[in-house]
Image (cartoon, helix red, strand yellow):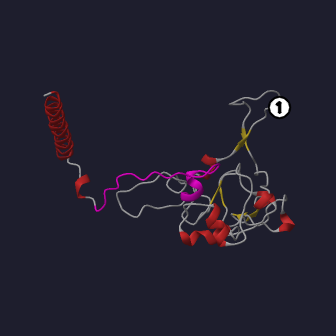
């Protein structure tokens, strides 16, 4: 008798949960219809894309000059803000992204006073690579795929290439040229890293605000 009552209670709970689920789905559908949303007519169920950028990099590092494919899409980046032009050269609002220096020689301050834009950026140094010797992290694809998980198969080769020339290790990275200026005369704002430095090469410390094309 007791088991019969338990079965009946479970059945009642199951029916109630199903009813709640149906009501929730109906409510979402009704809200979508009332708002005039076109969500149900998308070619895929994707509504949002979240981009995760690796440590010490920024969205503009990878998407500084990205232009949306569809007319109604927008993006907030260096190009849309007018900081750079589509070809990567300084744009009409380049000065709004000036990188500043601050005098803070006594105690650590989160927001030190006396900030002023650099006249030219301190020259980024060439460095990185395996044990900071400028070498690729792996010598062959087999080792790369063994110790690094989750990459597309075609990308493992890039873990065996790219390096920093020994002659410039720890020195100003002479591979960097921007807006007709060499690495020791960079303007005080974001600058393009490629094509002087290839996509799989190691490059400089991450304090400098560079971007790729």
In terms of depth relative to the viewer, which is nearer, 61 or 11? 11
In percent of width and height, residue 89 lies at 62, 62
Residue at mark 1: 105
Question: Compared to 198, does 189 lie above or below?
Answer: above
Using the rendered image of the protein, determine whether residue 127 is visible from the camera's viewpoint. Answer: no
Left or right? Give the position of 73 relative to 10: right
Is residue 172 visible in this depiction of the protein? Answer: yes
Q: Position of residue 23 (x, y in %)?
A: 16, 39
Q: Is residue 199 left or right of residue 21?
A: right
> Magenta residues?
43-64
Asked if residue 55 lies in the magenta stretch, the reply is: yes
Callout 1 secondary element: loop
Residue 171 % position (x, y): 85, 59
Which quarter of the rendering shows the C terminus? bottom right
- Quarter of the image where one finds residue 198: bottom right
Q: Classify residue 183 by image quadrant.
A: bottom right
User: Which residue sits furthest right?
Assistant: 167
Magenta part mainly helix, strand or loop?
Answer: loop
């Amino acid at each position: 008798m007791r088991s019969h009552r338990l079965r009946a209670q479970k059945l009642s709970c199951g029916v109630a949960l199903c009813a709640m689920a149906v009501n929730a789905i109906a409510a979402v559908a009704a809200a979508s219809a009332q708002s005039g949303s076109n969500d149900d007519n998308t070619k895929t169920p994707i509504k949002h894309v979240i981009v995760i950028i690796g440590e010490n990099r920024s969205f503009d590092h990878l998407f500084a000059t990205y232009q949306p494919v569809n007319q109604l899409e927008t993006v907030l980046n260096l190009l849309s803000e007018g900081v750079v032009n589509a070809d990567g050269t300084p744009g009409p609002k380049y000065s709004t992204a000036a990188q500043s220096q601050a005098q803070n020689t006594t105690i650590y301050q989160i927001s030190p006073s006396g900030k002023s834009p650099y006249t030219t950026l301190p020259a980024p140094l060439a460095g990185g690579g395996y044990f900071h010797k400028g070498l690729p992290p792996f010598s062959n694809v087999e080792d790369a795929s063994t110790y690094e998980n989750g990459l597309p198969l075609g990308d493992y080769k890039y873990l065996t290439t790219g390096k920093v020339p020994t002659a410039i290790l720890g020195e100003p990275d002479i591979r960097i040229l921007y807006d007709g200026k060499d690495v020791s005369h960079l303007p005080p704002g974001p600058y393009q890293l490629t094509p002087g430095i290839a996509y799989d090469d190691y490059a400089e410390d991450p304090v400098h605000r560079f971007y790729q094309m």
